[in-house]
C-alpha cells in the first residue's frame, strides 16, 4: 500500500539524530562493556612465554573455584604473623621458594576472575631446592618433590587466619590499603570477597579437621586421598581412620611412565588422568580446569630429563655398583624391566600399609565419576594390593625414601629396618652426597625449625623393602655411588 | 502643576497618540486555526484600550501561513481578513486608542507551524537550525525573498484598508527580519548576507515596498533589537549584532522613511533579557509538550523543564547573563539609538513604575514606553497612573508564567500570588477575555 504519510523534516532529522546517537551510545556501551569485561570477566591468567616460568607461575585453572583474592592472600601474613612458623618471613616460612622480583612464591599462579586471585599449580608440590652446604645458594630444581614445603602447615595457617576474630572486612581492607590503593569499585568487590573468602576457608577447615587426629605431614609430604575424599566428595571422615600421608613424587620424564602403575599404590596407569587427579588436589574443578595450560606442562614434562647428579662420582666404585644394581634392583626399578611400574603385594613389600588402605573402593567408585561429560572422564582408577615399583630416574633428589618418606637416605634404605633411623628431621635442603639424601640431623637453621619425623607413629613406619639390606657394606656403598648416575 | 509627561500626546509624523504608554505586542491563541480573527481578540485588545493606553501595538500578525509562529493567531495574509481587523480597530478607537498592527513573519522561529506547515521547513536567511528549540529551516531563495517582501507590502495595505492607525515591522527577537539582520544567524553568501549593509537589505526592501504601497502618510514603525546577544542562553553561539550595528541600522531605517523605532532586545524569543525575569520551569513543564514535534531540541528542552534534577541546567543558562534590574532593561540602548535618529523612539522592557517611565522619557531615553506583561497583570495601569499612583497594588512579578502559558493556554496573568492564592479567581480573571465587555 502506498505510504501517504511522509515524515516531517523534524521527524526525519530526529530519526537521523537518533540513529547517530544510537551509534554513539552503542559505541560507548561497547567500550564500557569491553572495559568492564577486561577488568572483571576475562578469567584471564597471567601467561608466561617460557615453559619453566609457566610451570612455576602459570595457571592450571585453580583460581576460579578455589583461588584466594590476591590482596587478601597477600596481607594475611601481615595481619597474623604470630601464626607463621617463622614470624616476619611470610609464606617463605612454610618452605615456599620466593624468587626475587616475583609477586608470589613458586607454585602460585594469578588469574583475573573479577579480581586477581591466587591459585596453586603443579610447581607447588613439585619444585624443591638443594644446597651444597649451609652457606650455598639453593639450586631450584623443577620437577623434584617440594622437599621443604609444608603444605599442611600452609593450609592450617589459612584456616587459622579465617577463624581469627580479627579477620573482618574492615581489618583486611585496612591491611590491603597499607600495601596498595584499591579504587572504589575494587574496594566494593573486596568487601564482598573478604567475607566470602573467610567463609570458604572456614568450611574447608571444617572439612579437613580430620587431619588433626592424624600425625602431621611435615614438609615434602601430603595425604593424597583423604583430603580428596573430604573436599571432592564430602565423605564423612569421622568414619575414616586411614592415614594416607606420602612423600611428594618427582614428575619428570613422564613418557616412559605411561602405562605403568602410577601413584604410590599404582592405582592408575594413565599419566594424563593422574595429572588431572593431581590438579583437582591443587584446586581445579572439572569445570575450571585449564586443559590447554595444563597440557603445556604435561608436554614439557613428557620428556623432561631427570637432573644429572651435580657432584663428583667415583666412577670405579660406581661401575661396581652398577653390577649390584642390575642384579638386585633393575628388575623392579629400571625402565623396560618386567616388574617396573607393577605393584608388589603389600605382604611381600612389607612397607607401611596405611597409604594402601587409605585408597578405598568407595573413593575409587566416586573418582571414576569425575570429569563426567568430558572426554577425559576418569576411568583408570583401580584398587591394588600393594605398592608400585617406581622407576628411579633422578633418585638422588628423591630422599627421604619409601612411599611415606620414612627412610632419610638411600644408604639408610639399604639397612635392615631396625637399623634405619627412628627419628630424623625433614625440610633441610643441604645435600648429603655420601648417603644420598638430605642431611637429616639438623633441627633448626636461622630460626626455622625443621620437622621431626617419628617412624613410630601410625603411617610413618620405615619397615619393609628389605631388598639390598643383606649386601655387604662395600656393595651397598658401590650401589649408592652408581645410583647417583640414575 | 506641570503636565505629566506620561499623559502628553506623542506626535509621530503621521500619527498622534494621546499618551506615552503603548501596549506592547502580546496576545494568546485567541483566533480561528485558519487565521480568521475572533471576538476573543477584540475582547483582549479592548481590555487595554479601556485601561487607557494611548495605543496598542498588536501581537504578531502573520503575513502568511508559512510565517506563522503559533496557530490561532489572526492573519493578515489575505483581503478577506480586512473586515475582522476593521472591526477590531473600530472597537479600540471607541476608547480614543490607536491601533498599530505588527506585521510578522516568524521565519525559522516557527514554534508550532500547524498542520499547514507539517511537511515544509520554515523560511529563513539560513539553513542552520535554531539553538533553542531546534526549529528546522531553509535559506530563502531570491524569489522567496521577493515573495515575502511583497507579502509584507500587501499586509500593510490591508492594515490601512482596515482603518488601523499604522503598521510595525517585526524586525527583532529572532523572527525572520532579525534572522537576516543578525550576524550570528545570517550566514548567506549572497547580497543579503555578509556585511551589515547586505544583512539590512531585506529589511530595507520591505520598508521600501511597504512605503510604496501604503504611501507616505501612513504611520509605519519598525521594532528592532538593539543588541542580539545571541549567546545569552546558548553560550556556544555567536554574539550577533551590537548596539553600534543597530544604531547604524536605525539610521538607515530612518532614511528609508520609517516614522518611529520600537526598541527591544535579543535575537531569540524567549531570550534571558526579553521578556526579562524568571523562567517558570514547573509551568513550562506543563505547557511545552505541544512543541516537542516542532524542533529537534524540543524534547531535550521538555526534559530539562520536566525533571527537577535537570532544571538547574536550564536555570543556569537562563540566568547566567541576566542583569539585576528588569524595569527599563533596554532604556540605555534606546537612549543611544535615540541620540542618532530624529524619529521618535519607543522602548519596551518591564516598565511598570510611573516615576521611572517619566524619568526615561524626560531624560531622553525614549519618547514613549511599550508595556506588555505589567498591562496583562493590570489592564488599567494607565488609569492607575492617572490616579496618581506610582505603581499598582499588585504589580507584575515578571515571573513569565504568562509567557510559558501562551504556547497552549489562554493568555493572562498566571501568578497565583496576585490572586491571593485563589486559583479559581485567577482562572475566572483569565477567562474574561472570552467575554465581551458590554
Image (cartoon, rainbow, N blue to C red):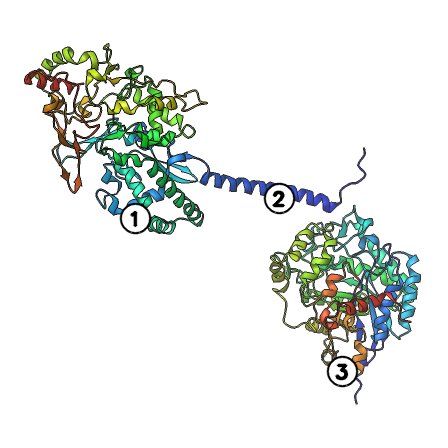
Q: Mark 1 points at which residue?
A: A79
Whether residue B308 sits left or right of residue A357 in the image: it is: right
| Residue B349 in sight here | no
Give the residue displayed 59% in from the left and 43% down from the top.
A25
First in sequence: mark 2 or mark 1?
A: 2
Q: Is mark 2 on a helix, strand or loop?
A: helix
Q: Can you identify the residue that label 2 sits on?
A: A21
Q: Mark 3 points at which residue?
A: B389
Q: Distance between the residues labelled 2 and 3?
A: 57 Å
Is there one chain holding both mark 2 and mark 1?
Answer: yes
Residue drawn where x is 89% and y is 65% of the image: B215
**How many marks are shown on the rendered structure?**
3
Q: In this view, does A228 lie to the left or right of A459?
A: right
In this rendered view, identify the residue nearer to me: A115 or B215: A115
Name the disc covering residue B123, or none: none
Is residue A336 visible to the viewer in this orientation of the structure? yes
- Who is closer to the viewer here, A136 or A225? A225
Q: How far apart are marks 2 and 1 (CA)?
A: 51 Å
Q: Do the residues labelled 1 and 3 touch (CB within 8 Å)?
A: no
The x and y percentages for residue B100 are 85, 68
The local secondary structure at tag 3 comes to loop
Amino acid at each position: 500500500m502506498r505510504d501517504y504519510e511522509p515524515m516531517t523534516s523534524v521527524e526525519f532529522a530526529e530519526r537521523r539524530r537518533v540513529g547517530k546517537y544510537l551509534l554513539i551510545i552503542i559505541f560507548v556501551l561497547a567500550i564500557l562493556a569491553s572495559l568492564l569485561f577486561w577488568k572483571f570477566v576475562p578469567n584471564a591468567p597471567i601467561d608466561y612465554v617460557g615453559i619453566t616460568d609457566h610451570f612455576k607461575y602459570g595457571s592450571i585453572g585453580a583460581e576460579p573455584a578455589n583461588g584466594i583474592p590476591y590482596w587478601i592472600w597477600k596481607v594475611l601474613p601481615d595481619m597474623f604473623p604470630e601464626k607463621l612458623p617463622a614470624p616476619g618471613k611470610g609464606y617463605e616460612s612454610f618452605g615456599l621458594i620466593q624468587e626475587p622480583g616475583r609477586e608470589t612464591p613458586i607454585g602460585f599462579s594469578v588469574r583475573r576472575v573479577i579480581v586477581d586471585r591466587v591459585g596453586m599449580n603443579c610447581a607447588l608440590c613439585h619444585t624443591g631446592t638443594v644446597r651444597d652446604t649451609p652457606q650455598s645458594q639453593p639450586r631450584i630444581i623443577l620437577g623434584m618433590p617440594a622437599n621443604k614445603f609444608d603444605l599442611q602447615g600452609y593450609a592450617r595457617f589459612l584456616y587459622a587466619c579465617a577463624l581469627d576474630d580479627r579477620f573482618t572486612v574492615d581489618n583486611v581492607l585496612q591491611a590491603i590499603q597499607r600495601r596498595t590503593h584499591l579504587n572504589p569499585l575494587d574496594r566494593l568487590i573486596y568487601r564482598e570477597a573478604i567475607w566470602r573468602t573467610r567463609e570458604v576457608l572456614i568450611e574447608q577447615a571444617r572439612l579437613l579437621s580430620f587431619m588433626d587426629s592424624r600425625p602431621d605431614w611435615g614438609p615434602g609430604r601430603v595425604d593424597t586421598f583423604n583430603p580428596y575424599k573430604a573436599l571432592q566428595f564430602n565423605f564423612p571422615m569421622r568414619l575414616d581412620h586411614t592415614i594416607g600421608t606420602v612423600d611428594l613424587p618427582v614428575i619428570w620424564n613422564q613418557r616412559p611412565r605411561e602405562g605403568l602403575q602410577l601413584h604410590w599404590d599404582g592405582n592408575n596407569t594413565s599419566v594424563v588422568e593422574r595429572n588431572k587427579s593431581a590438579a583437582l588436589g591443587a584446586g581445579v574443578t572439572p569445570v575450571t580446569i585449564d586443559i590447554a595450560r595444563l597440557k603445556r606442562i604435561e608436554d614439557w614434562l613428557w620428556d623432561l630429563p631427570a637432573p644429572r647428579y651435580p657432584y663428583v662420582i667415583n666412577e670405579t666404585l660406581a661401575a661396581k655398583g652398577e653390577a649390584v644394581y642390575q642384579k638386585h634392583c633393575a628388575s623392579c626399578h629400571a625402565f623396560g624391566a618386567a616388574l617396573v611400574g607393577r605393584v608388589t603385594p603389600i605382604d611381600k613389600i612389607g612397607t607401611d600399609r596405611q597409604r594402601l588402605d587409605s585408597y578405598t573402593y568407595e573413593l575409587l567408585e566416586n573418582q571414576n565419576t569425575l570429569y563426567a561429560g568430558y572426554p577425559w572422564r576418569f576411568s583408570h582408577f583401580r584398587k591394588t594390593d600393594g605398592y608400585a615399583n617406581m622407576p628411579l630416574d633422578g633418585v638422588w633428589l628423591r630422599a627421604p625414601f619409601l612411599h611415606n618418606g620414612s627412610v632419610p637416605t638411600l644408604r639408610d634404605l639399604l639397612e635392615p629396618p631396625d637399623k634405619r633411623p627412628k627419628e630424623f628431621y625433614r625440610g633441610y635442603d643441604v645435600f648429603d652426597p655420601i648417603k644420598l639424601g638430605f642431611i637429616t640431623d639438623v633441627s633448626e637453621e636461622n630460626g626455622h625449625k625443621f620437622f621431626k619425623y617419628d617412624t613410630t607413629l601410625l603411617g610413618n613406619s620405615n619397615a619393609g623393602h628389605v631388598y639390598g639390606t643383606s649386601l655387604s657394606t662395600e656393595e651397598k656403598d658401590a650401589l649408592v655411588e652408581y645410583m647417583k648416575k640414575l | 502643576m506641570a503636565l505629566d509627561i506620561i499623559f502628553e500626546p506623542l506626535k509621530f509624523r503621521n500619527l498622534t497618540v494621546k499618551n506615552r504608554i503603548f501596549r506592547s505586542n502580546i496576545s494568546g491563541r485567541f483566533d480561528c486555526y485558519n487565521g480568521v480573527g475572533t471576538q476573543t481578540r477584540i475582547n483582549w485588545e479592548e481590555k487595554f484600550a479601556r485601561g487607557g493606553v494611548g495605543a496598542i501595538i498588536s501581537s504578531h500578525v502573520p503575513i502568511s501561513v508559512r510565517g506563522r509562529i503559533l496557530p490561532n493567531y489572526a492573519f493578515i495574509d489575505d483581503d478577506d481578513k480586512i473586515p475582522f481587523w476593521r472591526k477590531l480597530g473600530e472597537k479600540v478607537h471607541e476608547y480614543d486608542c490607536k491601533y498599530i498592527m505588527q506585521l510578522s513573519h516568524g521565519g525559522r522561529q516557527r514554534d508550532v507551524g500547524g498542520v499547514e506547515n507539517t511537511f515544509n521547513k520554515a523560511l529563513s536567511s539560513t539553513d542552520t537550525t535554531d539553538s533553542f528549540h531546534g526549529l528546522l529551516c531553509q535559506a530563502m531563495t531570491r524569489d522567496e525573498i521577493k515573495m515575502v517582501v511583497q507579502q509584507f507590502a500587501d499586509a500593510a495595505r490591508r492594515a490601512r484598508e482596515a482603518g488601523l492607525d499604522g503598521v510595525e515591522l517585526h524586525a527583532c527577537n529572532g523572527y525572520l527580519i532579525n534572522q537576516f539582520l543578525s550576524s550570528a544567524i545570517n550566514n548567506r553568501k549572497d547580497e543579503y548576507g555578509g556585511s551589515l549593509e547586505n544583512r539590512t537589505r531585506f529589511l530595507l526592501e520591505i520598508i521600501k515596498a511597504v512605503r510604496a504601497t501604503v504611501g507616505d502618510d501612513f504611520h509605519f514603525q519598525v521594532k528592532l533589537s538593539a543588541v542580539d546577544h545571541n549567546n545569552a542562553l546558548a553560550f556556544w553561539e555567536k554574539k550577533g549584532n551590537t548596539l553600534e550595528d543597530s544604531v547604524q541600522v536605525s539610521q538607515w531605517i530612518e532614511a528609508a522613511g520609517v516614522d518611529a523605532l520600537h526598541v527591544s532586545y535579543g535575537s531569540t524569543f524567549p531570550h534571558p533579557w526579553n521578556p526579562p525575569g524568571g523562567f517558570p520551569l514547573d509551568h513550562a513543564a506543563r505547557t511545552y509538550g505541544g512543541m516537542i514535534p516542532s524542533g529537534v531540541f524540543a524534547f531535550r528542552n521538555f526534559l530539562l523543564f520536566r525533571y527537577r534534577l535537570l532544571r538547574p541546567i536550564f536555570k543556569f543558562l537562563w540566568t547566567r547573563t541576566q542583569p539585576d534590574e528588569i524595569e527599563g532593561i533596554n532604556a540605555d540602548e534606546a537612549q543611544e539609538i535615540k541620540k542618532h535618529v530624529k524619529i521618535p523612539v519607543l522602548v519596551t522592557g518591564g516598565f511598570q513604575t510611573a516615576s521611572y517611565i517619566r524619568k526615561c522619557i524626560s531624560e531622553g531615553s525614549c519618547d514613549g514606553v511599550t508595556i506588555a506583561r505589567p498591562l496583562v497583570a493590570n489592564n488599567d495601569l494607565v488609569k492607575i497612573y492617572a490616579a496618581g499612583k506610582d505603581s499598582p497594588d499588585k504589580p507584575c512579578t515578571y515571573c513569565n508564567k504568562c509567557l510559558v502559558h501562551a504556547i497552549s493556554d489562554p493568555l493572562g496573568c498566571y501568578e497565583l500570588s496576585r490572586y491571593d492564592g485563589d486559583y479559581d479567581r485567577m482562572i475566572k480573571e483569565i477567562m474574561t477575555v472570552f467575554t465581551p465587555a458590554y
